[in-house]
Amino acid sequence: MSQTRTDSAAAQAAIRANKAKKRKQFIRALFSRKIVLVSAVIVVLIILVALFANQLMPFDPNKPSVRDRNQGPSAVHLLGTDEFGRDVLSRIIIGSRVSLIVGVLAVVIACIIGTSLGMIAGYFGGIVDDVISRIAEAVRVIPQVVLAIALCAVFGGGIVNMSIILGISNMTVYIRMMRSQVMSIKERDYIMAGRLQGNSNARLMLRHILPNSISPIIVTMTQQIGGTILSEAGLSFLGLGISTPTASWGTLVSGGRSYLLTNPVYSLAPGVCIALLVICLNSLGDGVRDALDPRLRGEL
Amino acid sequence: MASKHLLEIRNLVTTFRSDNREFNAIEGVSMHVDRGEIVGIVGESGSGKSVTMLSSLQLIASPGRVAGGEVYLEGVKDNLLSYGSDSEEMRQIRGGRISMIFQEPMTSLNPVLTVGYQIQENILLHKKVTPEEAKRRTIEAMKMVNIPDAETRYDYYPQQFSGGMRQRIMIAMAMAPGPDILIADEATTALDVTTQAQLLEMIRDIAKKTNTAVIMVTHNLGLVARYAERIYVMYGGHIMETSDCVEVFHNTKHPYTRALLRAIPRLDDPKDRVLIPIDGLPPVPSQRPPYCPFYERCEYRCDACKANTDYSLKQVGENHWSSCILTQQQLDEGAEALLHKNYGESPVRPQLDDYCLKVSNVRKYFPVYKGLLRKKVGEVKAIEDIAFDLKQGETLGVVGESGCGKTTLARCIMRMYEPDEGTIIFGGRDIAHLKDKELKPVRPKISMIFQDPFSSLDPRQSAESIVGESLLIHKLVNGRTEYENRVDELLRKVGMDPAMKDRVAHEFSGGQRQRIGIARALSSNPDLIICDEPISALDVSIQAQIINLLEKIQAETGISYIFIAHDLAVVKHISDRILVMYLGRVMEIAECDELYEHPLHPYTQALLSAIPVADPLVEAQREAVPIQGEVPSILKRPSGCPFHNRCPRATERCSQEVPALHTVKGSHQVACHLV
Amino acid sequence: MARYIAQRLGQTLLVLLIVSFLTYMLVDFLPGDPIAAMTGGEISGETYERLYKEMNMDKPVLVRYALWLKGALTGDLGTSQSYHRRVVDIISERVPVTIYFSLLAFVISVPLGILFGIISAVRRGSAADTAVTLTANVCCCLPQFWLGILFMYVFAMKLGWLPSSGFVWPHEDLLLSIRQTIMPLLCLAIGGIASITRQTRSSMLEVIRQDYIRTARSKGLRSKAVIYVHALKNALLPVITLMGLRLGGLIGGSVFVENVFVIPGMGSLLVNAITSVDIPLIQGCVLLIAVFSCVVNLITDIVYVYVDPRIKVA
């Protein structure tokens, strides 16, 4: 008996070692391209900035100062001030929070709604599938920006509403993906074996289908965060998303465009931040995809 | 230095890159081919047989790389490998002098170009002819491979053809420029056996007529025994043995070849033959030892083998080479010792007279819907008039080609489908039309073992939860300890170490996964297990392990099996009786030996004749039963006897009236008007 | 094949019906009183009642939807509450402007995108590939509105080469029109080129791995022939889908560029409609944009039938 125990302890250790090795392999594959590593570092830096915004900001981002209105970059205000005399750098720093929160939250919302609907449609098929698929198709034919703009009118601005709006306008991707995933997995023998063993529908879906279909969904999520941040910035730029006085990179670009001649940095700098964050997130997402897909890694 | 052979490969080395490490997929393979001969290269997956062929044509794709060796072709002064992969010289040889056909007919033709274009392109590349002449030759080539209406079909796209037809087109394409060598890389593996036999006969005839050499790359020993004149046996990136076909099968030298021949079931086996599996697994290419790759699994191995790193081919007879370093005497002694080694008897299976299953008159049609409103436009007649019975402890083999309805039948018995008609008596009650709820107590009593060990186990679950799931769902155990003990017991029963039960499915090899699948099937103490092609996805050296395991389990528990497969040799080995299906109908049911010795139905005769026996001497004496055409699509089942339009003996009556299954003698039943 | 097209047409109509319903219901949820928004709130109770009846506000929502749909089918989308003109008239003024920019951008980005995509796929791993891929990845992520402002700052304000905003038709003033078109067009095209490049590249790389490419190579075709005869046609099929999606999306996607460069197109109209809670106008805009993208989708599918033999013979 004790012999078996040592055996299984050894086996356990071997399994753990194997898992650790897999993880290491994944990380090595992920960062095998320098650009992915650089992107990851930048994303982490931006997250840190957002977390420690209060410590990093030189000024109160929302405190107007009539005296300091519309200043260009200076030693005091590195990126100048806006039309109310607020420090642009501080507003960019605090604005990182909006982008990150909305980006992640919206993708999570889209994923949860989309995956559930897609799973139901794919699993049950028939009428249920028809209804869900047709509605999804109808939502999909409205260009995403237009849909988001229209939804803004209904939900209004604000971080939470923004996340819901972008979540809804992104969810069709997940519906379609999950649906086709489920439809192919459903045909695999292990699902039939599961059904023969008397699994209920709910148990089959949650315990057997979901874990096996989740990895492409996760890849898509990582790849969509960037695009969502871009959409949020766009809506805020149009004055439909995050409204003043909350600082968002989109509103900053919009706010600064009337002062391009006096302080171009005011409008252009937040745009650089958006682009940088989105580029890094996307290349990180591509990296995750390549690391998970061995075909692209050039393996056997 | 040029060579006296048509094609000669010397010391070819190809490396692959994985995880930033290079390893040799093949290490120093040498072989030659002479004009007009048919050479077989046999080996299991990963043995390097395809890599050798692709490398010699410089078709190996990244991350692979030809790292060394020489390839000489008659009439070409230089080593072919000295030309660049995309050089003019190499391209003229590729397709022009050496053509290749690949395994997957469904994906090997370009879907957006017509087949005519694809064949003609090959002619224009290598022959200086006008486009009109090329088109004429294309149609000629299509006629040569028996494609009806070649002129019309010239403008068809690949997806308008069946798999067998596509492979004919591949052959036409490869042969059109008149090459000196045709390489057929598992060219018929994906096809039905009768189609396979037709195509290989055709390749042989064409090759002999045009004096083209053929290199047949395959894992199937039967095929090389039937068609090849000379054989190379590959394992772990090396050639193990090579000689004339008869020599390899009847004066076998290398322990690997010997082991293979002992492991595979043959159509002409006596009923009580014991298959002797090869223990262990083939080495992973990246972890191959410096000594003989077969060492770990070899029954003849000695310490000298492990010390030796030079295992190039050594002459062991006239025209016979082997890589094994053991002397003839050592081999003879080893063989003698093995003869006396006890591998156990063929397990005796207790058979009862009680019936486990009685199926009568079962029919299942699938409706076909079309359009937005899902209007029913027709039916697929999957199975009709199925009737058979199965005793307790008995094994019934079900054979048939694609579309014969064997899977539908299995699913009806499993009650995944509800049959439209008929009765299925199991455990004393008719389960054919039970509701889901009423089926609940029946479910644990019928289990299934699936074909593909990679799709039949949930990749995210541990072995323990796969095996234990039905124990929990059907509440077959009380408490954690009993559960653990039962799972361990089941794993041990199928020859697995319970210590591995925490591993997830993808960490196991194909054979191990199939063992887990068997443990899962056993977990609910079933009376009947339906085995749906349980070994066809496994390497030959692993197949015997699983067959033996299934037989042992049956002897121990008295379970009944329905064993579905397309490989009659395997079915014949394991079954007591065999049921032959064709296009949804039962053609013939008989005891194994009776069916093999006195097949009555013309389809059974053709099927038996299409299956090669891994013995060239037996093959030479077998009579070929010709069969016309291919298995038609299930949507176009002919009226009357479904086989009448391919049957050489069909009469007027056959095309009008469906023959009923009637008893001929004893338990031999057949559905044919002529018997 | 005619059957297939008829079937797709039926599906499109069904989807359009759902879109119109969703659009109508969505906007119906809008907070605020449409009559108050329309009139500014300073009206008598009587007028309010009259308008209330006139706008069918007393009827159940499904009836109102049916009436609206009936109107839409006959070319009547109601009256804008902020412009006080017929919605159809406003939209018909704006649509040509947006289509003008969209088509130009599309025509520029498709050939360039495919070209760059092929170059980078064929020379996978080379410096050219790295440069193309990197540029495409960056250009995909640049916010259009920011790009517009950057161009405006550099080319209009600093260098003074181009007018900073406005729009005239080429037949009104050719030179001014060209000068005004350059910047918005660049903004629209850059993203398009980048995404078509990426799609073409990945699609090519996918196709190059297929079995039939190995077959083609085994025939002794030169690499160029393998790529341009055997791979390209297969690889461009998914690109057609992307092109359809982009074209369908362009009419709404130009909203940022229109906003930055003050161009009177559909995008700026929609934003105005939203900010002034102009319900009939919002409904009209969304419906029209959806119809447009549906029709483009349908056309893409029909194009597919002609270029993809896999559908043609199925």
Image: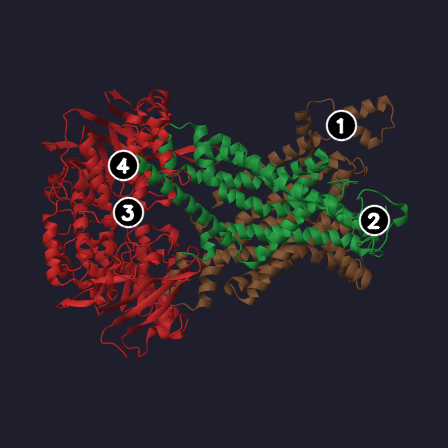
Chain colours: A green, B red, C brown
Nearest to the eye among marks 4 and 1: give it: 4
Is there any visible trace of residue C90 in the rendered image? yes
Q: Are marks 4 and 1 on the same chain?
A: no
Q: Position of residue A284 (x, y in %)?
A: 58, 51
Q: Viewed as shown, does residue B573 lie left or right of C140?
A: left
Quadrant placement of the C terminus of chain B: top left
Disc 2: which residue: A82
Disc 4: which residue: B492
Asked which secondary structure carries label 1, the reply is loop
How far apart are the two marked residues, 1 and 2, measured between alpha carbons? 45 Å
Q: Position of residue B92 (x, y in %)?
A: 36, 72
Between A35 and C187, the one nearer to me in the picture: A35
Q: Which chain hosts label 1?
A: C
Q: Are marks 4 and 3 on the same chain?
A: yes
How far apart are the two marked residues, 4 and 2, measured between alpha carbons? 75 Å
Residue at 66 percent of width and 34 percent of height: C23
Q: Which mark is residue B538?
A: 3
How far apart are the two marked residues, 4 and 3, measured between alpha carbons? 21 Å
Q: Residues within 10 Å of mark 4 (few under 14, many from 20)?
A: some
Nearest to the eye among marks 4 and 3: give it: 4
Nearest to the eye among marks 3 and 2: give it: 2
In the depicted structure, whether residue A184 falls above or below residue C194: above
Between B414 and B44, the one nearer to me in the picture: B44
Is there any visible trace of residue C314 in the rendered image? no
Asked which secondary structure carries label 3, the reply is loop
